[in-house]
Image (cartoon, helix red, strand yellow):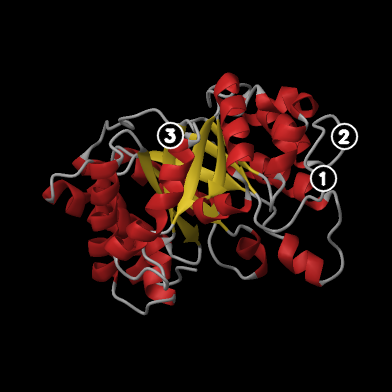
Amino acid sequence: MICCVGRLATVATLFLFTLMQAPNAQPARAIPGLVISPPGEGIRDLFQFPAAWADARAQTRAILYADHNLSRFSDAELRTWFAMMRTWNISLELEVGAVKEWGPTAEATFAAEQPHWDRALRLGADFGSIVMDEPLSASRGLLHQTDSYAVAQTARFVALVRQHYPTLRIGDVEPYPGIPLPDHIAWLRQLQSRLREQGVAPLDFYRADVDWVSFAKAGRGSWQEVASLAAATRASGVAFSLIYWASGYPSEKAEGVAGDDTWYVEVIGQGYAVADMGLRPDQFVLESWIDAPAAIVPDSAEFTFTRSVRDFGRKFIVDGSGRR
């Protein structure tokens, strides 16, 4: 948590700097309004039982999956699934590395991932976007590198993607409050600046992975700061994307108090908390990496993943465009 005058001053300075740079800027390219990512191999149920989540699907505009995990499925499965997604007008978003312990340079990471992307395209995917999985956090925590290193490698990775896949939307996801607010703002500003210097199109969206249970349990962060991050992101001309998830589930599971209802209750609860702040993201992402909920479909049953998608959309989005 930011707790001293100097840090607060840094927030204010960076925020005002960003606003002055582009006071009326808007995201340059539209991004899918509602993105979903069920846990584990739960994605299978979306295609094996399409009628069981018709209401939730009507609001969904993209399905998110880690690129390396596509290897779990056969060519025949993916070809069939991608064809179904096209008929539903749902695109594919892949979560990818940019700077990782197994790919410390942009070239190494891109070379490892490109075969997964080309396979998806070969099998008919409407491959619309990628989101880089925490390059700043990984550079700091896994590689013990400087932020300047993270900027250089991430910008190089974006340049490679723009060169080889010019139609892809590119975003970055970073954790909060694990990375403090001023660091988010400085990181985005520096990365965008480096891309402009290199003549590379900037990011299309910036996504916050908010561990919101830390607000109360650890006294770190707040929804007010998330709203400030959203404002700074948009002012720089980048769409603001927000993950909705059951932040309390891991600790509650360890304490033996998590149940089938935990995912649903906490996702909807986060929806209300964000809305009460007057914050409406440009993109809503319902993503589970916590092996919950256990059931994916149907969207008419209590506490399934697609039920959370259906009810969340009705309460906070209304339709899959991301607009009320």
From the viewer's perspective, tell me whether residue 110 is left or right of residue 57. left
First in residue order: circle 1 vs circle 3: 3
Specify whether residue 79 is in view: yes
Amino acid type of the residue tagged 1 in the rendering: Ala
Q: CA distance from mark 2 to mark 3?
A: 31 Å
Q: CA distance from mark 1 to mark 3?
A: 27 Å
Whether label 1 touches label 3, CB < 8 Å: no
From the viewer's perspective, tell me whether residue 55 is left or right of residue 89. right
Amino acid type of the residue tagged 3 in the rendering: Gly
The quarter of the rendered structure image containing the C terminus is top right
Residue receiving disc 3: 128
Vertical placement of residue 29 versus 98, above or below: above
Helix, strand or loop under label 3: strand
Residue receiving disc 1: 295
Neighbor class of circle 1 (other Cα within 10 Å; few <14, some 14-19, many 20+) is: many
Vertical placement of residue 156 versus 313, above or below: below
